[in-house]
Amino acid sequence: MRYLFLTGLLLSTLGLANAQTATRLNFTVKADSIKAHVQPTMYGIFFEDINMAADGGVYAELVKNRSFEFNTNLMGWAEQRKDGGNGTVSVVDRKTERPENPHYLTLNVSTPKGYYGLSNEGFGGMGIRKGEMYNFSVFARQHVGSKISLLLELHDSTGAVIGKTTLTPQGTEWKRYHATIRANTTTPKARLYVWAAKKGSIDLDMISLFPTHTWKNRPGGLRADLVQKLYDLKPGFLRFPGGCIVEGRDLANRYQWKKTIGDIDKRENIMNRWNVEFEKRRTPDYYQTFGLGFMEYFMLAEDIGAEPLPILNCGMACQYNTGQLVPLNQIDPYIQDALDLIEFANGSADTKWGKLRIALGHPKPFNLKMMGVGNEQWGEQYIERWKVFEKALKDKYPQIQLISSAGPDPSGDKFDYLNATLRGFKADILDEHYYRNPDWFFKSVTRYDNYDRK
């Protein structure tokens, strides 16, 4: 079924390209002539956090850099003043106290009248719809003696106010506050303004804005329109959390699933590798907040009727970048992450990680059946690590099918070595994870016709 899926993509590409040359391609589909039964799990979705697919994409958060953890702490934010208001803003580092969320903001208002604050640009602007409600939230605490009130506004691209509300945090201890803004205009390029009034100082963290209407109306959830499109594909599987971000440019920048679950303000932000991947096309505002984390991915797969297919790092960073390796005698934590993930997905309340899943609101197991060992790795170093993973996982969970990398090419030395070696080991499933232009896929449409169906 993979070749059918790729052909579908190819035809769309050819249709666009040939529209410019007025060349027509005619195809005859014999829909009543069934050649083979195709398993549902042969057609699915590969989620890749690239081109703002998660933050700024299917994750419905509208605020960029909501917890001030980007390398430039105020990236996405701009100081604002009106009606004679003035003040200063500072970013406080509390790394010792909160290493997973070390920064928060202090607004110091120096004038008794007017407003001083910040605006947030969102991800290329905030898409706002007329009549819809938007949920604002913030962690805040007043400084001793301060009674600052917050004015929250949405502005369109002309600066006109298209929705507003007020909020007055109370007390000198951190607390999460909520407010709702109704939009009176539809615009694709809105900004959020957070104004502080009255002289004094206030601390702010996790400044957030979500549409009330998310997928299944889950607070802080996913975009309903985009998830509906995924649902309509009727996918057999959902592969997550991506490809190259699993590996990381280096191992310190790899995806670690345990840091993406639990309290939203305790999920450690990291740079997305596509931030610096292309020298002439840097994207310095591309980070991962992990608001879309492994719990959300599992729930998304369940919602759209797809088998969850998580991919885990096998002790290798991206081989196109640093190619860092974990020595085999130090790989146990990586294997334990894989074992613990299966327990998190399928375990009962009697297990550590199953109990955590239940505490996070999902008593029913996710019935995980498949897991990827590495992304698009190759070479003997991959096979060395694959064998250690395969033994440990199969010893404890023999029913879990492992997805193994056949490398980044459809032929040649890398492919031939992995294809022969993994078939020799009777690997469950091989991922032919290659890169070629559309013409290659068109010419290779019969590639899988003679593959062993087992």
Image (cartoon, helix red, strand yellow):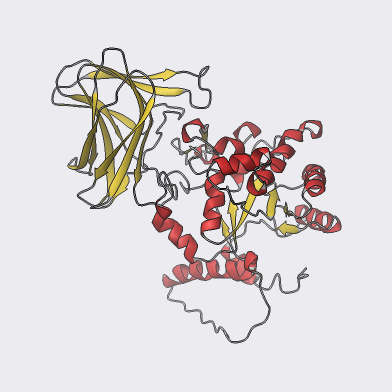
Q: Is residue 144 left or right of residue 447?
A: left
Please provide percent x and percent y for residue 437. 58, 61
Which image quadrant for residue 315?
top right
Q: Is residue 374 visible?
A: yes
Q: Is residue 48 visible?
A: no
In the figure, 34 relative to 214: above or below?
A: below
Q: Quadrant of the N terminus?
A: bottom right
**Image point (62%, 43%), residue name:** 246
Q: Is residue 400 left or right of residue 354?
A: right
Please provide percent x and percent y for residue 200. 25, 15
Which image quadrant for residue 104?
top left
Question: Farthest residue toward the top?
Answer: 145
Instruction: Looking at the picture, tell me which residue is in the foreground, 454 or 287.
Output: 454
In the figure, 56 relative to 172: above or below?
A: below
Q: Is residue 131 left or right of residue 70?
A: left
Q: Quadrant of the C terminus?
A: bottom right
Please provide percent x and percent y for residue 143. 31, 15
**Image point (55%, 56%), residue name:** 302
Figure disc tally: 0
Question: Farthest residue toward the right?
Answer: 424
Instruction: Looking at the picture, tell me which residue is in the foreground, 32 or 300.
Output: 300
Please provide percent x and percent y for residue 361. 52, 45
Instruction: Looking at the picture, tell me which residue is in the foreground, 246 or 400.
Output: 400
In the figure, 371 relative to 331: above or below?
A: below
